[in-house]
Image: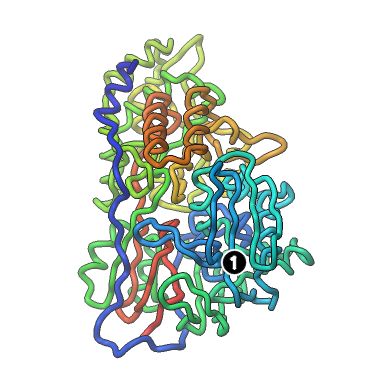
């Protein structure tokens, strides 16, 4: 039965298809692609600590890693999975065995060959506890073992059916590393990654930039043009300040900027020398995460109250200047098996009622609620990497205070934030989880993904709910598309009731460039800009 809280949150749950996407278009006026030159991308300060794709976990993962690394499959603009390093694949009737036939003629940057043994080594590296993979190990958790049938064929066995297996194999998190590097020097994958992609890793000046050079022998691109990149080189510069990044584009110091400041988007569109393109990222919307593993958000009514106390639209409009869409649930519309929800209510009166019901009936001189003499206080972690994230936390803090909830914001480094989140030493954080499957709900909310001493999980809210766990396991095992979509719809409705997070907005990638930059393309499995076909006139 739906509670009053759920009825306030949900007006309908109807299955919907994937949302529209935008493809960067070349600018007219030139005769055609002109090989040569170096393109410079201005990126925000969310710099990875390691360049091993199986260990990457920042929001810039795909942008940083995709130039170097190829994946087994490629996802196109319509969400279809296409061959890449795998030429073909078969799935057994029970969904437990995947047989991959691999592409011929592929070599890694160190000269090592792409074959069945290379794929097996990569799968083992992803799940090896020594890799300390925050993502890849979770994405292939059902992986059991693999058998080399011959040089071009690998038989992969799963411990249980896994409907998202092929989807995640198209992601950059599960890209392929040189088998020679994995066997001879696995410790070097962080600092000097070796892949098979259109660009070769050059130099990483931490806190500043990463440079890449063209792979002249590249001949296995996933799109229509399979040959080497047009560019001789690519440089990604990490630029923390939004204004600095935007002004660098205006001054011609960089050719492209990712994470365009929302306040600047309309100015970019009006500038005849600039171009703008965007795509909605699939996965989990940007959210305020709540730690359900301890007080105060171990109490469902307190979580529900904070959700109702936050005017999400007002916050998003003020921060994004109209560039972001307010989220309606726990999966973005561009994700397969998204369930179309209604409005998550803004209802301060009901929020106050829920806090009263939870026993927080008194207030101190500051207006903060009390129970048994203790203040209703929560600690929020902020890395300061993204100015919009900080603004969202500050406005959430203000909204919470009106309901009598005190949120103390602590400024910490990205590493400290990661470590404390893994330990459950926080109450509030903000973030997004981009992936091309609704299995993001299992990644984020299954009790199996709560971090333990043996395994780093991604259930940062530490939510544990038997009903939700059952639904998510059923969806993972389902081989029927319609049945799976229905199960995910029920799971999304359950999450609205449990309120482990406050979904805020469906974050798009906002990319601006000089008009003389052509051929920017998208990695649709993540919604990130790519450069194999890019050239500068």
Query: What residue appears at the point 34 percent right and 47 percent down from the top-left corner?
Result: 506
At label 1, counting other C-alpha atoms closer than 10 Å, the crowd grade (few under 14, some 14-19, many 20 or more) is many
Res 244 seen here: no
- In the image, 232 versus 40, the foreground residue is 232
Is residue 316 left or right of 66 when viewed as pictured?
Answer: left
**Quadrant in which the C terminus appears:** bottom left
x, y percent for residue 421:
58, 38
**Quadrant in which the N terminus appears:** top left
x, y percent for residue 55:
63, 54
Query: What residue appears at the point 37 percent right and 12 percent down from the top-left corner?
Result: 356
Res 252 seen here: yes
Is residue 168 left or right of 13 when viewed as pictured?
Answer: right
- In the image, 414 versus 93, the foreground residue is 93
Query: What residue appears at the point 71 percent right and 66 percent down from the top-left corner?
Result: 179
Give the residue number, with chain letter if any, for mark 1: 102
x, y percent for residue 217:
57, 83
The color scheme shown is: rainbow
Residue 418, image quadrant:
top right
Q: Residue furthest left?
A: 270
Q: Residue furthest front?
A: 93
x, y percent for residue 168:
52, 52
Classify 113 as above or below 472. below
| Total numbered labels placed on residues in the image | 1
Is residue 315 left or right of 60 when viewed as pictured?
Answer: left
Residue 118, image quadrant:
bottom right
Q: Secondary structure at mark 1?
A: strand
Query: What residue appears at the point 62 percent right and 56 percent down from the top-left corner?
Result: 54
Classify 92 as above or below 120. above
Q: Residue furthest right?
A: 184
């Amino acid at each position: 039965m739906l509670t009053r809280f759920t009825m306030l949150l949900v007006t309908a749950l109807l299955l919907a298809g994937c949302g529209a996407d935008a493809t960067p278009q070349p600018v007219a006026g030139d005769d055609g692609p002109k090989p040569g030159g170096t393109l410079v991308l201005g990126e925000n300060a969310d710099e990875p600590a390691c360049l091993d794709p199986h260990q990457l976990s920042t929001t810039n993962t795909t942008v940083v890693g995709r130039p170097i690394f190829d994946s087994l499959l490629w996802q196109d603009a319509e969400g279809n999975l296409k061959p890449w390093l795998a030429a073909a694949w078969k799935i057994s009737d029970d969904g437990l065995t995947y047989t991959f036939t691999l592409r011929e003629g592929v070599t890694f940057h160190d000269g090592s060959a792409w074959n069945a043994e290379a794929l097996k080594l990569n799968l083992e590296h992803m799940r090896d506890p020594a890799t300390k993979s925050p993502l890849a190990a979770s994405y292939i958790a059902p992986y059991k073992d693999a058998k080399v049938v011959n040089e071009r064929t690998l038989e992969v066995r799963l411990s249980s059916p896994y409907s998202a297996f092929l989807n995640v194999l198209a992601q950059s998190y599960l890209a392929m590393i040189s088998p020679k590097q994995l066997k001879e020097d696995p410790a070097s994958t962080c600092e000097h990654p070796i892949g098979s992609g259109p660009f070769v890793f050059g130099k990483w000046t931490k806190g500043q930039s990463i440079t890449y050079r063209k792979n002249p022998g590249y001949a296995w691109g996933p799109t229509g043009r399979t040959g080497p990149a047009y560019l001789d080189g690519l440089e990604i510069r990490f630029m923390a300040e939004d204004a600095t990044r935007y002004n660098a584009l205006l001054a011609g110091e960089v050719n492209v900027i990712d994470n365009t400041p929302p306040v600047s988007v309309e100015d970019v569109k009006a500038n005849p020398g600039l171009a703008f393109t965007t795509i909605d990222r699939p996965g989990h919307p940007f959210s305020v995460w709540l730690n359900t593993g301890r007080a105060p958000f171990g109490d469902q009514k307190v979580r529900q109250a904070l959700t109702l106390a936050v005017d999400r639209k007002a916050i998003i409009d003020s921060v994004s200047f109209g560039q972001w869409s307010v989220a309606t649930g726990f999966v973005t519309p561009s994700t397969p098996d998204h369930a179309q929800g209604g409005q998550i209510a803004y209802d301060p009166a009901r929020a106050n009622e829920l806090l009263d019901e939870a026993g927080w009936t008194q207030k101190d001189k500051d207006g903060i609620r009390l129970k048994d003499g203790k203040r209703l206080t929560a600690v929020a972690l902020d890395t300061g990497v993204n100015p919009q994230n900080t603004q969202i936390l500050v406005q959430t803090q203000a909204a919470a205070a009106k309901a009598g909830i005190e949120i103390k914001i602590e400024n910490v480094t990205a590493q400290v934030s990661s470590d404390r989140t893994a330990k459950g030493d926080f109450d509030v954080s903000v973030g997004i989880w981009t992936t091309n499957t609704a299995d993001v709900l299992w990644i984020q909310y299954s009790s199996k993904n709560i971090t333990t001493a043996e395994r780093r999980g991604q259930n940062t809210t530490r939510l544990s709910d038997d009903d939700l766990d059952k639904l998510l396991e059923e969806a993972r095992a389902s081989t029927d598309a319609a049945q799976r979509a229905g199960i995910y719809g029920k799971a999304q409705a359950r999450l609205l009731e449990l309120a482990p997070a406050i979904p805020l907005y469906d974050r798009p990638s906002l990319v601006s460039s000089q008009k003389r930059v052509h051929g920017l393309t998208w990695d649709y499995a993540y919604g990130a800009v790519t450069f194999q076909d890019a050239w500068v006139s």
